[in-house]
Amino acid sequence: MKMASSRRSFKRMKISACPETADLSPKDQLSRLPDGILLDILDRLPLREAIATSFIARRWRYLWRFMGKVDFTYHWLEETGKEIIPSVNSFIWRYKGKKIEHFGISFRYSRSKKHQVRSWVYFALRNKVEELDLNFNDLEDQRKTRKWKYHLFQLPKGLFCSSSLSKLSLSFLRLELPPRIQLKNLKELYFDRVILQDDAVSKITALCPVLELLSLFNCNMDCSLVVKVPPRPARLKLIILDEFLMVDYKKDLVIDAPGLSAIELCSGLTRKRFFIDNLPDGVEARLNFDDMLYGGRVILVNRPGLRGRQQYSKSLLFFLYKFRATCHLHLCSWCIQLLAVQKLMGLEERLSFDSTTLTLDTGLLMWELPGIAYLLDSCPVLEKLKINMVGQALLKYNDSFKRCHNFVEEGYWVGQGMENLAGLRNLRVVEFNNTHGAYQTWDDGSFNLRGFFTSYVNGVHLLRFLERKAPKLEKVIFRTNKKQVQVEKDALSVPQV
């Protein structure tokens, strides 16, 4: 035992101190850097390349054994030709570090691998892992037919009592929680295609005091998803993403969450019924269903309305009704277009939101304008309006609908009653974010408003309308991926188009 211990410490000493600086080439300045910097470099490289650095020089020979970020996925097998399981076992046997920041494994699980997987988890826990990512069905592995299997794997109980874990990601798993959970430092929790019991979310959110983010991606695809979040002192954001062709349409989504501070529903309205109760006042809400603007999911809009998809309008209005007390409402182009169809047909329901901030993801296209006007009229205490200029995509508008409800888009904002929109009374800040256009940067003092709105001409008309009709408007912010400029209202000059 003493010989083994001394041998291990000798190797560690070689890593940290060997070779001497005298043995290094004068040109090899990189190897003279401290171990911490070299390990930071290795952590930024793909695992195969990080291990390959052991052949650079003696100084690098054992450094990879002390890495803090480790990921074994199907890419490892493609690049090296080595299978995941023996590679992980070999890495663990050679590892000499004391702490792992990130440990991720993605593979095809079977019951015969149960004990090996448990040993991997224990290894990560012993090394005080901060971020753990376990994927039990790597979909990138194309050697076998894709199978949607949810294995009942008993995660070690010690995982749910870890004091070092701050981020946990689990994929393709039938989760059964132990009676005792004490994840006092867990801040982010991601479930991807995980089957959850009805009380799972309630237990987790109640016993993880600093949890800030809970993401549910295609969870409970063949059964109803129940999300209950009891009141809690810390802020918690909930993200639910249900993809088309993944989730059974006949199953329900039930949300009872007085402990939420923010909620985001993404991808598509894939479930037939939704139940939302006990959302606290002042919650931030986002609906992002723009995936439904592409492929075979695009709705056909004819003269009578949404052809065969009236339940989408009902579901959207249900969400908006439940989100009336939100402080920040964030809607996508798909939602805006559905509201526009309802408004043009005279079927809109009068709603009033308590939101002081309204964020709209929009292509500023003709058939979105009535929806934007509807939302501006529904936010009487609005103080900040954010327009995210996104990719431009439309529902399938039938020619009969266009002929019946056509209007002149250039003059839409000067139409009758526009100056009385309730959201204009307290509006103080308007922000336009252009992340898709060609105009991303400019020299100081040479911002070009016309260039900023290239391909988004209706943005100029909307800006001119807000400048003239919002009595308390103070400033307008123009932001791109690279730069931003803030213009006071008095200095704003909107060009003619």
Image (cartoon, grey):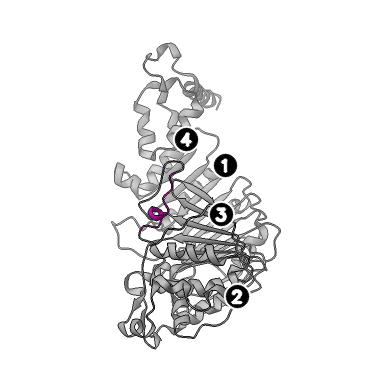
Residue 126, numbered circle: 1
**Real-space CA distance between mark 1 and mark 3, rounded to the nearest whole angstrom:** 62 Å
Disc on the earlier residue, 1 or 3: 1
Q: Secondary structure at mark 1?
A: helix
Which residue in the protein does label 3 denote? 490
Disc on the earlier residue, 2 or 3: 2
Q: Nearer the viewer, mark 1 or mark 3?
A: 3
Q: How dense is the environment of label 3, judged by Cα within 10 Å: few (below 14), some, or many (20 and up)?
A: few
Q: How dense is the environment of label 1, judged by Cα within 10 Å: few (below 14), some, or many (20 and up)?
A: some
Is residue 164 highlighted in magenta? Answer: no
Q: Nearer the viewer, residue 132 or 287?
A: 287
Q: How dense is the environment of label 2, judged by Cα within 10 Å: few (below 14), some, or many (20 and up)?
A: some
Q: Amino acid at mark 4?
A: Met
**Real-space CA distance between mark 2 and mark 1, rounded to the nearest whole angstrom:** 45 Å
> Residue 330, image x and y in percent?
53, 65
Residue 67, numbered circle: 4
Q: Secondary structure at mark 4?
A: loop
Q: Nearer the viewer, residue 23 or 273?
A: 273
**Real-space CA distance between mark 4 and mark 2, rounded to the nearest whole angstrom:** 48 Å
> Residue 362, image x and y in percent?
44, 65
Q: Amino acid at mark 1?
A: Arg
Which residue in the protein does label 2 denote? 322
Query: Does the CB distance between marks 4 and 2 fall below 8 Å?
Result: no
Q: Nearer the viewer, mark 2 or mark 3?
A: 3
> Residue 355, image x and y in percent?
61, 67
Quadrant showing the N terminus: top right
Q: What range of the chain is rendered magenta? A: 446-454
Is residue 450 highlighted in magenta? Answer: yes
Disc on the earlier residue, 2 or 1: 1
Disc on the earlier residue, 4 or 2: 4
Quadrant showing the C terminus: bottom left
Q: Secondary structure at mark 2?
A: helix
